[in-house]
Amino acid sequence: MNATPLGVFDSGIGVLTVARALFERLPWESVIYFGDTARVPYGPKSPETVRRYSREILAYLLHRGVKTVSSPATRAPPMRSSICVPTPRCRSWG
């Protein structure tokens, strides 16, 4: 078993549903949850602003050593061209 935590983030409390599902289905995993309640709502923000917030949160989670990141944010713009979290299935995006 890999003790490295999973990372989960969203712009508010919506991700708690995802975090709860992770706890129920993967009870042996540790999870770092980041709910960005300081800058909600994301809805009226520009795609570039949401992208910037997402990059900042992702950098924080990666600094904490997560092995993967999940963000169920429905408004989050695609970031594949700028960020890659190395995993067994994803060595790089492009």
Image (cartoon, rainbow, N blue to C red):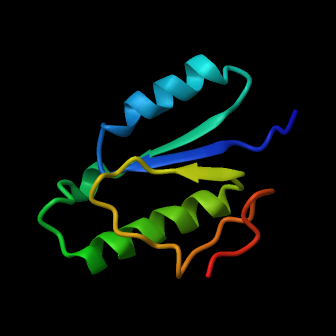
Residue 6 horizontal/vertical position (percent): 64, 43
- Using residue 71 as the reference point, say whether residue 39 is left or right of it: left
Q: Position of residue 58 (x, y in %)?
A: 53, 63
User: As rendered, which of 88 and 34 lies closer to the eye?
Assistant: 88
How far across and how far down the image is residue 70, in percent?
52, 49
Give the total number of marks visible in the rendering: 0
Residue in the image at 85% along x and 39% along y: 2
Q: Residue at x 53, y 81 (%)?
A: 82
Screen quadrant of the N terminus = top right
- Tell me: 18 left or right of 89: left
Which residue of the protein is positioned furthest toward the right in this rendering?
A: 1
Is residue 64 toward the left or the right of residue 45 in the image? right
Q: Identify which residue is drawn at 61% across, 82% down.
A: 94
Percent coordinates x, y for residue 67 in the rendering? 72, 51
Q: Is residue 25 above or below residue 61?
A: above
Picture residue at 48% right of the left edge, 24% below the top: 20
Q: Which residue is at the front of the view, 13 or 80?
A: 80
**Quarter residue 44 falls in:** bottom left
Image-quadrant location for residue 28: top right
